[in-house]
Image: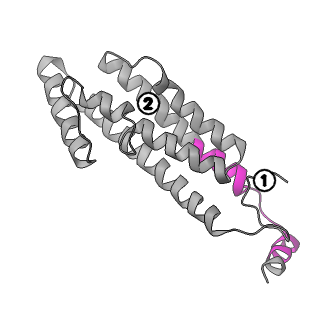
Amino acid sequence: MDPRTIALGSDRWLTDSRVYNLVWLGRWIERAQNVARVLLWAVREHSDGDEGEQRMEEVLGLATAIRGMTVGPGASNLTALLTLDTGASLRGCLVAARYNATQVAPVEVIQTIGAALEPLDGDLPTSTQEVEAMVSGIMDTLDSLHSTIEDAWFHSSVLSEEEVYRRFVQQQ
């Protein structure tokens, strides 16, 4: 049996630390998706022309302020929301999610989170089209993470009456 599974059996218990890591795994994934949505919205709606770039930076400035981030002089709000090493940036959320996943999740979940992190570890995009493509790719990976979790933990097949009864009896 994989030691990083939440499947309950007669020899496995869902401990407090496992529940803690599961809750925070979900919260970090949700936060990462929220940051990615804000970035996509800002890039798509506010990046037309020279004036649009300034509006986009203002919108992202509001997003960093709301998330409690301090952006140093000369740094852009976009870079901060993408890569700043705090739980408020996209990278920070994914790193924290990967840490929690290593405590409780199957390898497939950890690999999917790692795949979402890969674009943020290289050179950052310079144009708004590149930012949109990168963040869209990360969002697609995070969307596939949900199906990975579904497949790894909640098996989409219908349980037989005997299996439902067996699981019920095990819980007693």
Q: Which mark is residue 136?
A: 2
Does residue 144 show up magenta in the picture?
no
73 shown above or below 155: above
| Contact check, label 1 and label 2, Cβ < 8 Å | no
- Residue furthest to the bottom in view is 172
Instruction: Indicate the amino acid at tag 2.
Output: Ser
133 shown above or below 169: above
- Residues rendered magenta in the picture: 145-167
Q: Position of residue 111 (x, y in %)?
A: 65, 36
Q: Which residue is mark 1?
A: 3
Q: Is residue 23 left or right of residue 82?
A: right
Which residue is found at the position 51% from the left and 35% from the top? 140
Which quarter of the picture shows residue 84? Answer: top left
Q: Nearer the viewer, residue 169 or 24?
A: 24
Which residue is found at the position 37% from the left and 25% from the top? 132
Which colour style is shown? one colour
